[in-house]
Image: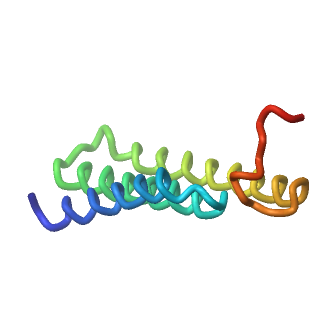
Amino acid sequence: MTHILFTLTAAFTLGLSGLTFNRTHLLSALLCLEGMMLSLFIALTMWCSLNDMIMFSSAPLLLLALSACEAGLGLSLLVATSRTHGSDHLQNLNLLQC
């Protein structure tokens, strides 16, 4: 296992573990999701460049565009949640109430 592969795997696992174990604030969950998406973007970019995949060269840009849309949607949910509930604590949110 090369150092780069180990680093990308460690970054993805740290983001995943932060998402599963640290569920106090919505902002920390969004940051963990962004870290996971960025590690996937770098891994896909390096895979395409190392294997000389011309056909899949647009795949990292598509992933980056989707992660930007996800970040925008997450930030809009964060603003809407903080306006309605007063904070971004995930434990205060009850999905059964309208």
Q: Is residue 73 shown left or right of residue 63?
A: right
Q: Residue at x 62, y 48 (%)?
A: 70
Q: Is residue 48 shown left or right of residue 74?
A: left
Q: Quadrant of the C terminus?
A: top right
Q: Residue at x 40, y 43 (%)?
A: 59
Observer-nearest of 91 and 52: 91
Instruction: Give the vertical position of 40 relative to 54 (above or below).
Output: below
Q: Quadrant of the N terminus?
A: bottom left
Q: Quadrant of residue 78?
A: bottom right
Q: Position of residue 67 (x, y in %)?
A: 55, 51
Q: Position of residue 68 (x, y in %)?
A: 60, 54
Q: Residue at x 28, y 61 (%)?
A: 10
Q: Position of residue 66 (x, y in %)?
A: 56, 45
Instruction: Give the vertical position of 68 relative to 4 (above or below).
Output: above
Q: Is residue 34 shown left or right of residue 98?
A: left
Q: Quadrant of residue 95?
A: top right
